[in-house]
Image (cartoon, rainbow, N blue to C red):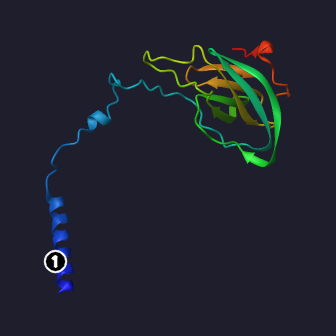
Amino acid sequence: MRALLIFAASVACAAGALSALADEPRRAIDVTRALDAGSPGPGLPDIAITRTPPDPPPLVERSQWVFDLRWDRGDVWLLGLHPLELTEPQATPRVMGRFALELFEGPTLIERVRFDFPLLAVPEADASPSFASKLKTRIGVVFPATKRGTRLELWDRATGRRWALPWPPRSTPAASAQTDAGLAD
């Protein structure tokens, strides 16, 4: 009896599957809306495709630099930097962020460390309130202390603005608010 029930259920399932394959589709799928290369609709953001090089393979270093950076009402300040020695070599972590420290050797990108300043979001396209105009925040960014590289830049990926940073760096004490030195454009 049990075998007969299993056989009947199998036949019913097979018949249902075959009828599903034989039926005409109930509605058409309009792929032109999903694959439209025209301008984005009113609620969609503009997407700009850039020639940003991909992240290079991460450097593995035991020695690191900590860049003490401040965002002060739209300006970036380098407050100081100091060395950091790890117990063992560590690869540079890959994360997303609005800002990036990029190390170049000639025209070649050899390291990129992305980060975000606390409380600083990507600029909004609409007229929503923003903290950026009055925000003062600070972050320590860990960067590998490699002997490679000829130029280090801090890049605000949202605005395209770049600042040159000293490379190779020299250890400095963290500066006070009165002795801050701004970064050159």
* Residue located at (23% from left, 38% from top): 30
Q: Position of residue 180 (x, y in %)?
A: 77, 15
158 or 78: nearer the eye?
78
Report the residue at 57% width, 17% height from top: 132
- Whether residue 13 appears in this view of the structure is yes
53 displayed left or right of 111: left
Q: Position of residue 84 (x, y in %)?
A: 81, 38
Answer with left or right where residue 175 lies relative to residue 103. right
Choose top left, top right, bottom left or bottom right for residue 52. top right
- Residue 76 lies, in percent from the top left, at 68, 18
Q: Is residue 167 visible?
A: no
Q: Is residue 126 left or right of residue 110?
A: left
Q: Quadrant of the C terminus?
A: top right
Q: Residue at image x 61%, y 18%?
A: 135
Is 157 located above or below residue 95 in the figure?
A: above
Q: Which residue is mark 1?
A: 8
Q: What residue is at 52 percent from the left and 27 percent from the top?
A: 50
Judging depth in this view, the residue of 162 and 67 nearest the camera is 67
Looking at this view, name the residue that lies furthest to the bottom: 1
Quarter where residue 92 is shown: top right
On-image quarter of the N terminus:
bottom left
Q: Secondary structure at mark 1?
A: helix
Q: Please state which of residues 16 and 24 is positioned toward the viewer in this rendering.
A: 16
Q: Amino acid at mark 1?
A: Ala
- Locate residue 160, reporting x and y percent: 58, 20
